Amino acid sequence: MKKVLITGAAGFLGSHLCDRFIHDGYHVIGMDNLITGDLKNIEHLFKLPQFEFYNHDVTKFVHVPGELDYILHFASPASPIDYLKIPIQTLKVGSLGTHNLLGLAKEKKARIIIASTSEVYGDPLVHPQTEDYYGNVNTIGPRGVYDEAKRFQESITMAYNSYHNVETRIVRIFNTYGPRMRLNDGRVVPAFIGQALRGEDLTVFGDGSQTRSFCYVDDLVEGIYRLLFSDYVYPVNIGNPSEITIAEFAEEIIKLTGTDQKVIYKPLPVNDPLQRQPDITKAKEVLDWKPIIGRAEGMKRTLEYFKSLSEEELYKSEHKDFSSYS
Ligand code: UDP
Protein backbone atom coordinates (compact mmCIF):
# COMPACT_ATOMS: atom_id res chain seq x y z
CA MET A 1 0.00 0.00 0.00
CA LYS A 2 1.48 3.38 -1.01
CA LYS A 3 1.85 5.90 1.80
CA VAL A 4 0.97 9.59 1.57
CA LEU A 5 1.51 12.40 4.07
CA ILE A 6 -1.06 15.22 3.90
CA THR A 7 -0.31 18.35 5.93
CA GLY A 8 -3.21 20.58 6.84
CA ALA A 9 -5.27 17.38 6.93
CA ALA A 10 -7.95 18.78 9.24
CA GLY A 11 -8.51 21.82 7.07
CA PHE A 12 -10.97 22.38 4.25
CA LEU A 13 -8.82 21.20 1.32
CA GLY A 14 -6.64 18.81 3.32
CA SER A 15 -9.64 16.85 4.60
CA HIS A 16 -11.07 16.42 1.09
CA LEU A 17 -7.65 15.24 -0.11
CA CYS A 18 -7.51 12.70 2.74
CA ASP A 19 -10.90 11.36 1.60
CA ARG A 20 -9.73 11.06 -2.00
CA PHE A 21 -6.51 9.20 -1.18
CA ILE A 22 -8.26 6.86 1.28
CA HIS A 23 -10.89 6.17 -1.38
CA ASP A 24 -8.16 5.33 -3.89
CA GLY A 25 -6.48 2.78 -1.61
CA TYR A 26 -3.60 4.71 -0.04
CA HIS A 27 -2.34 4.65 3.52
CA VAL A 28 -2.83 8.26 4.62
CA ILE A 29 -0.97 10.08 7.39
CA GLY A 30 -2.84 13.28 8.17
CA MET A 31 -0.83 15.99 9.93
CA ASP A 32 -2.21 19.20 11.43
CA ASN A 33 -1.59 21.41 14.46
CA LEU A 34 -5.27 22.41 14.48
CA ILE A 35 -4.70 26.18 14.51
CA THR A 36 -7.25 26.69 11.79
CA GLY A 37 -8.16 23.05 11.10
CA ASP A 38 -10.89 21.11 12.84
CA LEU A 39 -10.82 17.39 13.71
CA LYS A 40 -14.51 17.23 12.88
CA ASN A 41 -13.50 17.33 9.20
CA ILE A 42 -11.65 14.01 9.43
CA GLU A 43 -13.26 12.27 12.39
CA HIS A 44 -14.96 9.78 10.04
CA LEU A 45 -11.46 8.54 9.03
CA PHE A 46 -10.19 7.76 12.53
CA LYS A 47 -11.76 4.30 12.60
CA LEU A 48 -9.89 3.22 9.47
CA PRO A 49 -6.63 1.27 9.92
CA GLN A 50 -5.19 2.91 6.79
CA PHE A 51 -5.50 6.38 8.36
CA GLU A 52 -3.23 7.88 11.02
CA PHE A 53 -3.28 11.36 12.49
CA TYR A 54 -0.28 13.29 13.84
CA ASN A 55 -0.98 16.48 15.78
CA HIS A 56 2.15 18.34 14.76
CA ASP A 57 3.28 21.82 13.72
CA VAL A 58 5.24 21.44 10.47
CA THR A 59 7.38 24.50 11.23
CA LYS A 60 9.14 22.14 13.68
CA PHE A 61 11.21 19.18 12.44
CA VAL A 62 8.87 16.67 10.79
CA HIS A 63 9.45 12.99 11.47
CA VAL A 64 7.52 10.18 9.83
CA PRO A 65 8.75 6.62 10.42
CA GLY A 66 9.20 4.20 7.53
CA GLU A 67 8.69 4.74 3.85
CA LEU A 68 6.76 7.57 2.27
CA ASP A 69 5.73 7.81 -1.37
CA TYR A 70 3.97 11.17 -1.61
CA ILE A 71 3.69 14.40 0.38
CA LEU A 72 0.91 16.95 -0.09
CA HIS A 73 1.76 20.17 1.73
CA PHE A 74 -1.55 21.93 2.42
CA ALA A 75 -0.91 23.33 5.89
CA SER A 76 -1.43 27.10 6.02
CA PRO A 77 -3.91 29.67 7.21
CA ALA A 78 -5.69 30.59 3.99
CA SER A 79 -8.20 33.33 4.63
CA PRO A 80 -7.32 37.03 4.89
CA ILE A 81 -8.82 37.20 8.39
CA ASP A 82 -6.72 34.26 9.58
CA TYR A 83 -3.44 35.50 8.25
CA LEU A 84 -4.07 38.94 9.66
CA LYS A 85 -4.53 37.34 13.08
CA ILE A 86 -1.56 34.97 12.82
CA PRO A 87 0.84 36.68 10.43
CA ILE A 88 4.05 35.17 11.77
CA GLN A 89 2.71 31.63 11.83
CA THR A 90 1.54 32.19 8.25
CA LEU A 91 5.05 33.21 7.17
CA LYS A 92 6.61 30.31 9.07
CA VAL A 93 4.40 27.55 7.70
CA GLY A 94 5.02 28.67 4.11
CA SER A 95 8.77 29.03 4.57
CA LEU A 96 10.12 26.92 7.46
CA GLY A 97 7.31 24.37 7.13
CA THR A 98 7.90 23.96 3.40
CA HIS A 99 11.65 23.63 4.00
CA ASN A 100 11.04 20.82 6.51
CA LEU A 101 8.72 18.97 4.14
CA LEU A 102 11.09 19.32 1.19
CA GLY A 103 13.82 17.90 3.44
CA LEU A 104 11.53 15.01 4.33
CA ALA A 105 10.75 14.43 0.63
CA LYS A 106 14.48 14.31 -0.15
CA GLU A 107 15.18 11.90 2.70
CA LYS A 108 12.29 9.56 1.79
CA LYS A 109 12.65 9.98 -1.99
CA ALA A 110 8.99 10.96 -1.99
CA ARG A 111 7.27 13.12 -4.56
CA ILE A 112 5.90 16.35 -3.06
CA ILE A 113 3.18 18.72 -4.21
CA ILE A 114 2.90 22.09 -2.54
CA ALA A 115 -0.22 24.23 -2.33
CA SER A 116 0.47 27.61 -3.84
CA THR A 117 -2.17 30.21 -4.58
CA SER A 118 -3.50 32.83 -6.96
CA GLU A 119 -2.30 35.29 -4.30
CA VAL A 120 1.19 34.99 -5.83
CA TYR A 121 -0.28 37.21 -8.59
CA GLY A 122 -1.28 39.82 -5.97
CA ASP A 123 -3.63 42.47 -7.32
CA PRO A 124 -3.05 41.36 -10.91
CA LEU A 125 -2.33 43.71 -13.79
CA VAL A 126 -2.82 40.88 -16.29
CA HIS A 127 -6.24 39.33 -16.77
CA PRO A 128 -6.96 36.43 -16.76
CA GLN A 129 -3.86 35.26 -14.94
CA THR A 130 -1.51 32.92 -16.76
CA GLU A 131 1.27 31.03 -15.02
CA ASP A 132 3.98 33.17 -16.61
CA TYR A 133 2.64 36.41 -15.05
CA TYR A 134 5.01 37.46 -12.24
CA GLY A 135 2.41 39.21 -10.11
CA ASN A 136 1.81 42.51 -8.36
CA VAL A 137 2.23 41.98 -4.63
CA ASN A 138 2.61 44.56 -1.87
CA THR A 139 5.26 42.90 0.31
CA ILE A 140 4.34 44.93 3.39
CA GLY A 141 0.57 45.06 2.94
CA PRO A 142 -1.77 42.97 5.12
CA ARG A 143 -1.77 40.12 2.57
CA GLY A 144 2.02 40.27 2.20
CA VAL A 145 2.62 37.64 4.89
CA TYR A 146 0.63 35.08 2.93
CA ASP A 147 1.58 36.14 -0.58
CA GLU A 148 5.31 36.34 0.09
CA ALA A 149 5.37 33.09 2.08
CA LYS A 150 3.75 31.37 -0.89
CA ARG A 151 6.13 33.01 -3.35
CA PHE A 152 9.11 31.89 -1.24
CA GLN A 153 7.53 28.44 -1.08
CA GLU A 154 7.52 28.19 -4.86
CA SER A 155 11.18 29.32 -5.05
CA ILE A 156 12.47 26.85 -2.48
CA THR A 157 10.44 24.08 -4.10
CA MET A 158 12.02 24.74 -7.50
CA ALA A 159 15.44 24.92 -5.84
CA TYR A 160 14.97 21.48 -4.24
CA ASN A 161 13.88 20.22 -7.63
CA SER A 162 16.91 21.51 -9.50
CA TYR A 163 19.57 21.22 -6.78
CA HIS A 164 18.51 18.04 -4.97
CA ASN A 165 16.49 16.40 -7.76
CA VAL A 166 13.45 16.11 -5.52
CA GLU A 167 10.30 15.33 -7.51
CA THR A 168 8.18 18.43 -6.95
CA ARG A 169 4.86 19.76 -8.18
CA ILE A 170 3.30 23.20 -7.60
CA VAL A 171 -0.44 23.92 -7.78
CA ARG A 172 -1.67 27.53 -7.82
CA ILE A 173 -5.10 27.33 -6.26
CA PHE A 174 -7.75 29.93 -7.06
CA ASN A 175 -10.81 30.62 -4.86
CA THR A 176 -12.33 27.28 -3.93
CA TYR A 177 -15.50 26.49 -2.00
CA GLY A 178 -17.50 23.58 -0.71
CA PRO A 179 -18.49 21.65 2.41
CA ARG A 180 -16.20 21.99 5.47
CA MET A 181 -15.24 25.61 4.88
CA ARG A 182 -15.08 27.31 8.25
CA LEU A 183 -18.23 29.34 8.77
CA ASN A 184 -16.45 32.29 10.35
CA ASP A 185 -13.11 32.43 8.61
CA GLY A 186 -14.17 35.60 6.80
CA ARG A 187 -14.12 34.17 3.30
CA VAL A 188 -16.94 35.33 1.14
CA VAL A 189 -18.72 32.02 0.48
CA PRO A 190 -19.26 30.98 4.13
CA ALA A 191 -19.75 34.64 5.09
CA PHE A 192 -22.67 35.17 2.70
CA ILE A 193 -24.26 31.75 3.29
CA GLY A 194 -23.95 32.13 7.07
CA GLN A 195 -25.47 35.61 6.95
CA ALA A 196 -28.37 34.42 4.79
CA LEU A 197 -29.08 31.44 7.06
CA ARG A 198 -29.03 33.64 10.18
CA GLY A 199 -31.32 36.18 8.55
CA GLU A 200 -28.66 38.91 8.52
CA ASP A 201 -27.93 41.34 5.70
CA LEU A 202 -25.11 40.34 3.37
CA THR A 203 -21.95 42.44 3.73
CA VAL A 204 -20.40 43.35 0.39
CA PHE A 205 -17.00 44.99 0.74
CA GLY A 206 -16.29 48.02 -1.45
CA ASP A 207 -18.79 48.66 -4.27
CA GLY A 208 -18.91 44.93 -5.05
CA SER A 209 -17.42 45.36 -8.52
CA GLN A 210 -14.35 43.27 -7.66
CA THR A 211 -14.45 39.84 -9.25
CA ARG A 212 -13.62 36.31 -8.18
CA SER A 213 -13.93 32.94 -9.93
CA PHE A 214 -15.10 30.12 -7.67
CA CYS A 215 -14.12 26.47 -8.08
CA TYR A 216 -15.99 23.60 -6.42
CA VAL A 217 -13.75 21.53 -4.15
CA ASP A 218 -14.23 18.19 -5.96
CA ASP A 219 -12.99 19.73 -9.21
CA LEU A 220 -9.98 21.16 -7.42
CA VAL A 221 -9.11 17.83 -5.81
CA GLU A 222 -9.24 16.13 -9.22
CA GLY A 223 -6.88 18.77 -10.65
CA ILE A 224 -4.42 18.36 -7.77
CA TYR A 225 -4.55 14.59 -8.15
CA ARG A 226 -3.79 14.75 -11.87
CA LEU A 227 -0.94 17.22 -11.34
CA LEU A 228 0.68 15.08 -8.65
CA PHE A 229 0.75 12.10 -11.00
CA SER A 230 1.87 14.11 -14.03
CA ASP A 231 5.47 14.82 -15.04
CA TYR A 232 5.04 18.61 -14.97
CA VAL A 233 7.26 20.45 -12.47
CA TYR A 234 6.27 24.08 -13.11
CA PRO A 235 3.32 25.82 -11.44
CA VAL A 236 -0.16 25.05 -12.78
CA ASN A 237 -3.28 27.14 -12.16
CA ILE A 238 -6.24 25.13 -10.92
CA GLY A 239 -9.51 26.99 -10.63
CA ASN A 240 -12.79 27.67 -12.35
CA PRO A 241 -12.64 30.50 -14.92
CA SER A 242 -16.32 31.40 -14.45
CA GLU A 243 -15.95 34.95 -13.12
CA ILE A 244 -18.52 36.98 -11.20
CA THR A 245 -18.58 40.28 -9.33
CA ILE A 246 -19.02 40.05 -5.58
CA ALA A 247 -22.22 42.16 -5.79
CA GLU A 248 -23.73 39.69 -8.29
CA PHE A 249 -22.58 36.81 -6.14
CA ALA A 250 -24.42 38.24 -3.14
CA GLU A 251 -27.62 38.34 -5.23
CA GLU A 252 -27.08 34.71 -6.26
CA ILE A 253 -26.79 33.64 -2.63
CA ILE A 254 -29.94 35.54 -1.67
CA LYS A 255 -31.82 33.79 -4.49
CA LEU A 256 -30.34 30.38 -3.65
CA THR A 257 -31.23 30.57 0.02
CA GLY A 258 -34.69 31.94 -0.72
CA THR A 259 -34.28 34.65 1.87
CA ASP A 260 -35.17 38.30 1.42
CA GLN A 261 -32.00 39.71 2.91
CA LYS A 262 -30.62 43.03 1.79
CA VAL A 263 -27.06 43.77 0.74
CA ILE A 264 -25.15 46.29 2.82
CA TYR A 265 -21.86 47.84 1.80
CA LYS A 266 -18.72 47.96 3.97
CA PRO A 267 -15.25 49.39 3.26
CA LEU A 268 -13.01 47.40 0.95
CA PRO A 269 -10.11 45.79 2.84
CA VAL A 270 -6.63 47.10 1.96
CA ASN A 271 -5.05 45.46 -1.13
CA ASP A 272 -8.17 43.43 -1.87
CA PRO A 273 -7.55 42.29 -5.49
CA LEU A 274 -9.91 43.95 -7.97
CA GLN A 275 -10.21 41.01 -10.31
CA ARG A 276 -9.20 37.39 -10.39
CA GLN A 277 -9.73 34.70 -12.98
CA PRO A 278 -7.52 31.73 -13.76
CA ASP A 279 -6.30 31.04 -17.26
CA ILE A 280 -6.43 27.23 -17.22
CA THR A 281 -4.99 26.58 -20.69
CA LYS A 282 -1.98 24.88 -19.11
CA ALA A 283 -4.10 22.56 -16.93
CA LYS A 284 -6.13 21.58 -19.98
CA GLU A 285 -3.01 20.87 -22.04
CA VAL A 286 -0.87 19.14 -19.44
CA LEU A 287 -3.49 17.43 -17.27
CA ASP A 288 -6.49 17.20 -19.59
CA TRP A 289 -8.36 18.83 -16.70
CA LYS A 290 -11.16 21.34 -16.53
CA PRO A 291 -13.80 21.98 -13.87
CA ILE A 292 -17.13 20.24 -14.43
CA ILE A 293 -19.26 21.44 -11.50
CA GLY A 294 -20.85 24.83 -12.11
CA ARG A 295 -21.64 27.40 -9.44
CA ALA A 296 -25.36 26.54 -9.31
CA GLU A 297 -24.73 22.88 -8.45
CA GLY A 298 -21.67 23.54 -6.28
CA MET A 299 -23.37 26.24 -4.22
CA LYS A 300 -26.40 23.99 -3.75
CA ARG A 301 -24.19 21.26 -2.28
CA THR A 302 -22.36 23.79 -0.13
CA LEU A 303 -25.61 25.25 1.18
CA GLU A 304 -26.77 21.74 2.16
CA TYR A 305 -23.63 21.38 4.24
CA PHE A 306 -24.09 24.69 6.05
CA LYS A 307 -27.77 23.90 6.63
CA SER A 308 -26.73 20.66 8.35
CA LEU A 309 -24.78 22.57 11.02
CA SER A 310 -26.34 22.93 14.45
CA GLU A 311 -27.90 26.21 15.58
CA GLU A 312 -25.03 26.53 18.03
CA GLU A 313 -22.45 26.28 15.24
CA LEU A 314 -24.37 28.65 13.01
CA TYR A 315 -24.52 31.37 15.65
CA LYS A 316 -21.13 30.82 17.25
CA SER A 317 -18.74 33.69 16.54
CA GLU A 318 -15.14 32.82 15.71
CA HIS A 319 -14.20 29.92 17.93
CA LYS A 320 -10.49 29.81 17.26
CA ASP A 321 -8.15 31.12 19.91
CA PHE A 322 -4.96 32.22 18.20
CA SER A 323 -3.46 33.92 21.23
CA SER A 324 -0.75 31.33 21.87
CA TYR A 325 0.71 31.38 18.35
CA SER A 326 3.49 33.52 16.96
N1 UDP B 1 -16.02 39.89 0.68
C1 UDP B 1 -17.21 40.58 0.84
N2 UDP B 1 -17.95 40.36 1.97
C2 UDP B 1 -17.59 39.46 2.94
C3 UDP B 1 -16.39 38.73 2.75
C4 UDP B 1 -15.63 38.98 1.62
O1 UDP B 1 -17.59 41.41 0.00
O2 UDP B 1 -18.32 39.33 3.95
C5 UDP B 1 -15.23 40.11 -0.54
C6 UDP B 1 -13.75 40.40 -0.31
O3 UDP B 1 -13.53 41.77 -0.05
C7 UDP B 1 -13.15 39.95 -1.63
C8 UDP B 1 -14.06 38.79 -2.07
O4 UDP B 1 -15.26 38.93 -1.33
O5 UDP B 1 -13.20 40.97 -2.58
C9 UDP B 1 -13.48 37.42 -1.79
O6 UDP B 1 -13.01 37.39 -0.49
P1 UDP B 1 -12.39 36.10 0.18
O7 UDP B 1 -11.92 36.50 1.54
O8 UDP B 1 -13.34 34.97 0.08
O9 UDP B 1 -11.13 35.68 -0.71
P2 UDP B 1 -9.92 36.47 -1.41
O10 UDP B 1 -10.10 37.95 -1.24
O11 UDP B 1 -8.70 35.95 -0.79
O12 UDP B 1 -10.09 36.07 -2.83
Image (cartoon, rainbow, N blue to C red):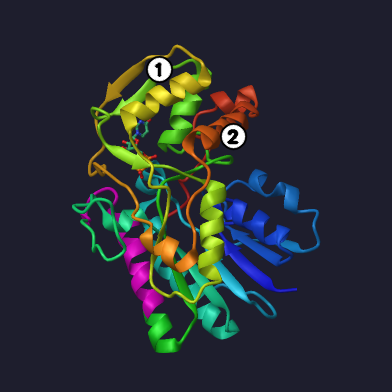
Of 154 and 124, the residue lying toward us: 124
Q: In this rendering, would 159 be left or right of 69?
A: left
Say what secondary structure mark 1 lies in. loop
Contact flag, marks 1 and 2 (Cβ < 8 Å): no
Say what secondary structure mark 2 lies in. helix
| Residue 107 placement: quadrant | bottom right
Stretch in magenta: 137-158
The quadrant of the picture showing ligand 1 is top left
Q: In this rendering, would 46 be left or right of 75?
A: right
| Residue 46 placement: quadrant | bottom right
Does 225 appear above or below 252? below
The residue to which callout 2 is attached is: 301
At 62% from the left and 22% from the top, the residue drawn is 311
Residue 157 spot, x, y in % from top left: 41, 75
At 58% from the left and 39% from the top, the residue drawn is 179
Q: In this rendering, would 169 be left or right of 110?
A: left
At 49% from the left and 39% from the top, the residue drawn is 294
Amino acid type at image mark 2? Arg
The answer to whether residue 81 is magenta is no
